[in-house]
Image (cartoon, helix red, strand yellow):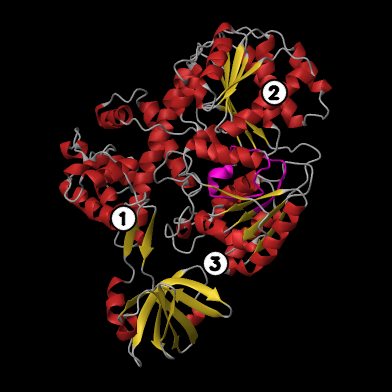
């Protein structure tokens, strides 16, 4: 253990050879300023040169290597400024087509009668397999690199993977040690790699086994820090006294009997829990964990109404402006319809200066007692008069610091969090460590179950026609692609190209929109708003659509590359439809063609229960799924994944509890590096 940070870690990334002003600016766009930031910029996946296989073993959508020989003439044709070279090649099991664009010189590189290894993305055109722009190797050259793992990093425009690899190798070589925070006996007990070695190996692993060992150590660090911070947070909050007097629930209880529908038994039980918390001796820290459509929002409104009738202010923070506006309109409408003492005000970033000033005044003088908004609620200019309740909708979108900042707008405010993330209870108890959990696992009457189907790529034309028919019937559809642009991950559909593909496949009158995470916040809000208002018929999106919008008119969800997602995330995406009074549908496209992928996806076909699906997800996911779409990407973990690392989460929680039992404030000499590590790391873990 070093006891002090290596000074080379705090040097600016521009101190490394090859990083000039332009490259430095690109690195900063990725959040990389120092050498330490760079070393923590882990690969999103790896280019693994797998074993050579036969043509008969190829699968569409996979990157593969085949050893084949020219079996026909090489043809070159020109279309405008494009030169297209094609030829047939075969092995003893079959024949396939190879195509190169603007590479006419390949004609001289391929000699008849010679075997070469071609490696690339496998596509199917008609009955034939095709590779476009594959890399070509001599057999002996490919055998040398077979099994190697080349890191592929998240990129921004103009920043190449090769530059990151080059700079990363420099950083690793110039940093002889990294501070070790875990005592040796813990590493031996849990079979953990040294931290310094783990950082080196996760960037440049020799093989999959080395990668898994390195990943385990770094994921464990993240999870241990997460759990320890929650334990300290919970300890502080449990000592907070409830200074608010909630003694009247006549109006809120009466509303339940006046609603045009009956609350479920579970909703009524949780409502009693909320009331008991608000009346109790300590401030409330409760999470309502409920599946999509289980009725969390009405419980939030009842809590805000209970707060208003006792003379206090309540605030609800949503992850997007669209969802905040939808809450505001619903709350306003309900307050007027039932003549309730709730006076809502909306506070979001896109309001004009005048609108914000009016909202600030209403909040400060107490005229508004229900404040609905986004993170605009925690801006310095916002002064609350009697804030006593803070609600965060889609809790996993907000960091601990954001939640604390909002609660600090009052004095020891009550906190009610809501989440639709389906997490098995065994994990939820750890991950929601600072909150009391209420599980809303009973669906309201009248919800029409979503109809699901798992199909291969050959079904796409039928799916497009089905989407077209639904739009003609006045409904809307989502199409989900994993990637934003071509080349981010081989074999994955991207929203940029897919939008163009749909424009060609669907009638011109169908309005198609595009949404992804790299858009400016204002642009994203505008697109979601247009979709919510029916100005877009089909929205092609990445998983950014997972939460933050409620469109009852959307009846179709089509998910491309669905085999690359975790089951729990597929369920979250599916939850964007089925919110209205008509039948909704979810189409899972299995692009791999593999039977085992189809069997796994069939779980989605037979269940709409998010908690059962989450439990199944824990059993299903293994090391082979590591390079799919990270499910907990919205959490602030760089490496750890709540589904992939379920066992590791339990180990981290067990160690955290043991450490704090023996040394509650981590002041013992052997635990000092852990305490220093916790205090010095400004990383804002998301409390789900």
Residue 331's disc number:
2
- Residue 424, visible in the rendered structure: no
Q: How many tags in the picture?
A: 3
Return the disc, 2 or 3, that comes first in the chain's sequence.
Answer: 2
Give coordinates of residue 65: x percent, y percent. Answer: 40, 75
Residue bearing mark 1: 160
Cα distance between the residues tagged 2 and 1: 48 Å
Disc ID at residue 592: 3
Does the segment drawn in magenta span residue 542? yes
Instruction: Locate residue 339 relative to residue 681 in the image: left or right.
Output: right
Instruction: Residue 223: give x, y in percent of width and height.
Output: 41, 39
Q: Which one is nearer the viewer's eye here, 32 or 687?
A: 32
User: On screen, 318 above or below 539?
Assistant: above
Please tell me how crowded label 2 is: few (under 14), some (14-19), or many (20+) other residues with Cα within 10 Å: many
Closer to the camera in the image, 451 or 512: 512
Corner quadrant of residue 281:
top right
| Nearer to us in this view, 639 or 492 | 492
Classify mark 1: helix, strand or loop: loop
Mark 1 → mark 3, Cα distance in angstroms:
28 Å
Question: Callout 3 environment at 10 Å: few (<14), some (14 to 19), or many (20+)?
Answer: many
The magenta stretch is 534-557
Q: Is residue 454 left or right of residue 681?
A: right
């Amino acid at each position: 253990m070093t006891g002090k940070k290596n000074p080379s870690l705090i040097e600016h990334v521009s101190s490394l050879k090859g990083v000039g002003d332009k490259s430095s600016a690109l690195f900063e766009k990725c959040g990389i300023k120092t050498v330490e930031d760079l070393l923590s910029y882990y690969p999103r996946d790896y280019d693994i040169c797998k074993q050579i296989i036969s043509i008969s073993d190829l699968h569409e959508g996979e990157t593969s290597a085949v050893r084949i020989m020219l079996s026909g003439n090489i043809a070159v044709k020109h279309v405008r400024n494009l030169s297209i070279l094609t030829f047939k090649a075969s092995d003893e099991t079959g024949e396939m087509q190879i195509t190169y664009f603007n590479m006419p010189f390949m004609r001289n590189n391929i000699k008849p009668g010679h075997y070469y290894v071609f490696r690339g993305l496998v596509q199917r055109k008609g009955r034939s397999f095709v590779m476009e722009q594959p890399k070509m190797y001599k057999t002996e050259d490919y055998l040398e690199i077979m099994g190697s793992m080349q890191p592929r990093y998240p990129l921004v425009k103009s920043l190449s993977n090769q530059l990151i690899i080059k700079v990363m190798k420099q950083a690793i070589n110039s940093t002889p040690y990294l501070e070790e925070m875990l005592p040796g006996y813990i590493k031996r007990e849990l079979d953990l790699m040294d931290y310094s070695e783990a950082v080196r190996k996760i960037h440049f692993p020799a093989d999959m086994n080395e990668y898994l060992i390195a990943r385990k150590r770094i994921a464990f660090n993240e999870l241990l820090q997460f759990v320890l911070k929650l334990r300290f947070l919970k300890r502080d909050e449990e000592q907070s006294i409830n200074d608010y007097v909630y003694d009247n629930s006549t109006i809120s209880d009466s509303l339940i009997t006046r609603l045009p529908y009956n609350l479920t038994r579970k909703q009524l039980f949780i409502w009693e829990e909320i009331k008991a918390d608000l009346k109790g001796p300590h401030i409330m820290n409760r999470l309502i964990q409920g599946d999509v459509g289980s009725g969390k929002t009405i419980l939030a409104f009842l809590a805000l109404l209970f707060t208003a009738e006792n003379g206090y202010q309540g605030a609800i923070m949503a992850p997007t402006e669209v969802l905040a506006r939808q809450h505001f309109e619903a709350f306003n409408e309900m307050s007027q319809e039932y003549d309730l003492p709730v006076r809502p005000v909306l506070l979001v970033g896109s309001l004009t200066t005048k609108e914000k000033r009016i909202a600030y005044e209403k909040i400060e003088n107490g005229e508004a007692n229900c404040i609905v908004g986004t993170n605009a609620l925690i801006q310095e200019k916002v002064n609350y008069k009697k804030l006593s309740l803070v609600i965060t909708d889609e809790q996993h979108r907000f960091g601990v610091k954001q939640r604390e900042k909002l609660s600090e707008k009052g004095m020891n405010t009550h906190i009610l969090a809501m989440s639709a993330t389906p997490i098995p209870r065994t994990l939820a108890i750890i991950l929601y460590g600072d909150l009391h959990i209420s599980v809303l696992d009973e669906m309201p009457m009248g919800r029409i179950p979503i109809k699901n189907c798992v199909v291969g790529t050959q079904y796409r034309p039928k799916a497009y026609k089905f989407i077209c028919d639904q739009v003609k019937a006045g409904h809307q559809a989502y199409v989900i692609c994993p990637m934003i642009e071509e080349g981010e991950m081989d074999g994955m559909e991207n929203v940029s190209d897919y939008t163009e593909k749909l424009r060609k496949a669907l009638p011109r009158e169908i309005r198609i929109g595009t949404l992804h995470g790299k858009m400016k916040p204002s642009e994203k809000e505008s697109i979601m708003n247009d979709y919510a208002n029916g100005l877009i018929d089909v929205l092609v999106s990445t998983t950014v659509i997972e939460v933050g919008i409620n469109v009852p008119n959307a009846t179709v969800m089509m998910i491309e590359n669905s085999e690359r997602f975790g089951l729990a995330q597929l369920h979250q995406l599916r939850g964007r439809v089925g919110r209205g009074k008509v039948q909704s549908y979810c189409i899972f496209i299995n692009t791999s063609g593999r039977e085992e992928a189809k069997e796994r996806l069939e779980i989605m076909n037979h269940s709409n229960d998010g908690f059962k699906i989450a439990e199944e997800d824990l059993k299903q996911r293994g090391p082979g799924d590591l390079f799919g779409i990270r499910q907990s990407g919205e959490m602030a973990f760089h490496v750890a994944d709540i589904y992939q690392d379920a066992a590791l989460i339990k180990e981290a929680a067990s160690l955290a509890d043991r450490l704090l039992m023996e040394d509650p404030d981590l002041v013992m000499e052997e635990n000092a590096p852990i305490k220093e590590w916790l205090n010095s790391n400004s990383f804002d873990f998301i409390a789900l």
